[in-house]
Image (cartoon, coloured by chain):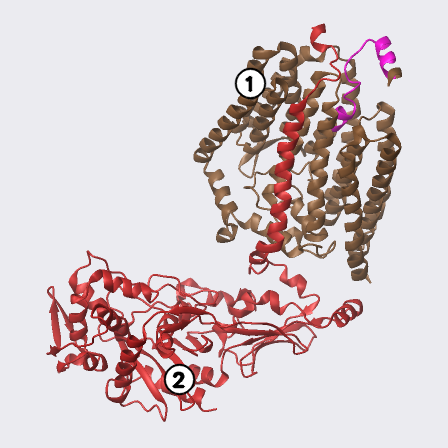
Chain colours: A brown, B red
Amino acid sequence: MVSVITNFSRITILSYVIIFTLIDCVLLFEPKLNEGLNSILVTIQAVMIVLFLVNGSVVLYFSAEEPRIILLLVLELLFLLIFALVINKITVPVSKGLINNVLFLISMSLITLERLNLTRAARQFIFLIAGVMLSILVVYILRKIPQINRLTFVFGGTGIVLLLLVGLMGVVEYGAKLSLSFGSVSIQPSEFVKLSYLFFISGCIVTFKDFKGFLFAGIGAALHILVLIYSKDLGTAFIFLVTYIFLIFIAYKNYIVLAIELFLGIAGGFIAYNMFPHIQRRFVAWSDPLSVVEDQGYQISQSLFAVGTGSWLGSGLNNGLPNKIPVVVKDFIFAAISEEMGAIVAMCLIIIYMCTFIMIFNVSFNCTYSFYMLVTSGFAIIFAIQTILNIGGVIKFIPSTGVTLPLISYGGSSLVSLLIGIFITECSEDLWHLPSKRKRNYINKR
Amino acid sequence: MNKVTKPKKNHIRKEIYVTAVIFAFIFLCMIFFLYHFIRYDSKDFIYNSFNARFSVFADDVVRGSIYTADGKVMAQTSKDDEGNEIRVYPDERLFSHEVGYVGKGMAGLEASYSFDLLKSHITLDDQINNSLTGIKSPGDNLYTTLDYDAQKAAFEGLGLYDGAVIAIEPETGKIVAMVSKPDYDPNTIAKYWDDINDSSKNSSVLMNRATNGSYPPGSTFKIVTTLAYLREHDEDDTYSYNCNGHIDVDGYTIHCSSNEKHGKENLLQAFSNSCNSAYADIGIHLDREAFINTAEDLYFNKTLPTMLSASKKSAFNIDSDTKESIVGQTAIGQGATSVSPLHMAMLVSAIANDGELMEPYLADKLVSAEGDIVSQTEPVSAGLIMSAEEVDTLNKYMEAVVMDGTSAKVDFGDLSVYGKTGTAEYSENKKLTHSWFVGYASNDDGKQLAIAVIMEGAGYGSKFAAPLAAKVFNAYFEE
């Protein structure tokens, strides 16, 4: 009986994901679609999210015989409803497709975590609620700050100080210093510094313009990156570097500078490769993981066993062995999804991630204020690189870097920081502090 | 400040989409990469013995059985008293290195065909029926190329000696018998696992010496030296040497076996008497470069062309700087040369097959529980490694070994047998020798079998290894 439900659900879950993905590809052109069609598509997607959550939870409930899963499901559905109401209350969302994508990825995260480790799933759900509340708070605060670009150096300074704190007093995990520990709670400041870094770079460019802005932004970025290298958090250092390069490109529209910076970035990569033995080990594990399967290739081999054995349709929820993969709930959660839901779902997921960052770029393209145009572009870039580094590492496309998968990996800091980023993106049109009279006019115009 | 923050509507921000396209391109590459991995590369990972997910397949499918070519069970799954599935190997140690084991990790055919044994090719109706009713489907069965009687003769003939026997059908490369000792009982391997892997005991029972052993070839290597001589002299075997029981090379003395003086002899006599002095003399006069080329044409220092999961490279270590005394020893199969029994069996099988080397294989076909062939291995040629003239000459020489040379006293029955013995020193103590025989036999119907036998520390090849080869030949041709 259970195996019939599981096997049947493989097909139904696959079809929800495929329908969601196909609509996503159409919604890329959201700014150009007419409103009627748009709202029909968005509604179908929302239905798919609910079906996915319900179907996934039912399979897990029957195969694990765990009543808490049904309780979680009820809370999750309630959360979806409240989320939709709240975001419409605080702003006129610029992209409904983006909201759907975020909710879909969060649902995928919850179902996968419930499958892997129910306690972690429950904690992640609490992080999720806390993250949404914090995001709303951030939006309100940002609206109250007049001329936010005056605070450029406050953002830059805070970011560097936080990273320095991690470098000096952080807890070492997997060879890198990533988190600060306060009793039983530990947070990863670098996740939040990603946002302050965006505000800093955007502020520099908007305030000082031209060469001076370029110079200040460059010095600030270099300081961030050097502190990260000192903490051996090379994955995040790479994200900061690429974000800086492309933000400068978007702001100054200079292809030659882009080419030079990319070249310098690659040269820096070579130096780092020769400087850090643990990078070289990751390259060996990447080029031929089976030759070192008992050693540094263990994790990536386990990941590929999972993805390969799961094949196109997957083993069905609770039918695989994803817990054999070390750190599966964080860095290697994509392998768990691919093993049990199949490589087709995994490919759809890559497309959904691609649509998500393009939707964020859509928002920044249509952004009224150049400051938030840069912040949202930077957020899209961070989102895209982080996805590439994580999924690429899991499927052996690139060496693994220990970066988490946006919105799906377990971890509070990353989830909260991404949610704040999403809220800033959705509210980007009305975050700029305007005298209340002008603001009323502006809202009436829309 | 006001100027900067002024809204800039309808500003063309093309670079945003340039950036988006760059990143989207990487995403599309990842999708293609994942597709390619699942479609083509994932098999290497699924088959890997570190992949624990086999236990999950085993929930729906009963692991298939493994059979010899003549249908005797090598491994099967049955139930113990409590109804748990257990893997049973009815002949215990007889097939240990071929069939391998499953449980404490995997090895042998159990490892390389694990995925296939856990696949079921019964009709779709039955499969759906089974999955709905919760009955396990029977996995596909594997038929090997092994001949039960030949295997048993080799196993019993080797007796208490360590060593290896490997017999190959020359026309196809089918491995008919393969025994390696010391061995283990796959039924109880989990129980004795710690003992078996105790490195202080240095027993290496898990190693298949037939494919992965590394032995001094002794006089069996004279086949290679003879080929090098023939190639250098345009297939002309005119040669004369006066043997007085030893030869001095570079201040080092090489003795003939038992210091026997063979007197004046031609190449055929030197070969069939296994005269070390004559062959050392040939070796030091050979063109080095040509000698190395001949050895490498015969797959020394190279990966052997086989369909087996692993085999050891044979080593032939001389170059232009090597001292003459070492070259002289190498020519008689001592020195720095080492071979696997598999390699020697492949060389003689190529002689038996008119110079064409067939890639050895062990897994013949996969058959579904209902008897349909799922897949069958086709013989693969590794090409001609010697000419027809060379084969003729070697046939003549190897026949002389059996008719009136070192193996004249061995009773091979009615078979036509061609062979070469070897007595290989392997330590400082020159009295300790490995006993070698390599060769092939054919019966009146033209059926052939090539063999390599090594018995560690047994003594003369003619006294131990050659009679064992005779037993295997008789068991194989008797049916």
Q: Is residue A395 above or below residue B90?
A: above
* Label 1: element kind: helix
Residue designated by label 1: A218
Chain under callout 2: B
- Please report the residue visible at 35 percent of the width from the left and 65 percent of the height from the top: B299
| A36 displayed left or right of B212 | right
Q: Does residue A221 appear to the left or right of A357 in the view shown?
A: left
Asked whether residue A373 is drawn in magenta, I would say no
Same subunit, labels 2 and 1: the answer reads no
Circle 1: is it few (<14), some (14-19), or many (20+) Cα within 10 Å?
some
Look at the image and tell me in which quarter the N terminus of chain A lies.
Answer: bottom right
Mark 2, secondary structure of its residue:
helix
A253 or B332, which lies in front?
Answer: A253
Residue position marked by numbered label 2 in the rendering: B157
Quarter of the C terminus of chain A within the rendering: top right
Identity of the residue drawn at 23% across and 58% down = B319
| Left or right, A422 with reference to B94 | right
Does residue B107 lie above or below A262 as drawn? below
User: Horizontal and vertical percent for residue A401?
Assistant: 57, 38
Mark 2 is on which residue type? Answer: Gly
Which contiguous range is marked in magenta?
A422-443
- Dividing the picture into quadrants, the one containing residue A426 is top right
- Which residue corresponds to the image point at 57% horizontal and 44% vertical from the top-left? A397
Q: Residue A338 carries which label?
A: none
2 vs 1, front mark: 1
Q: Are marks 2 and 1 in contact (CB under 8 Å)?
A: no
Q: Distance between the residues labelled 2 and 1?
A: 80 Å
Q: Is residue B262 visible?
A: yes
Q: Is residue A190 left or right of residue A97?
A: left
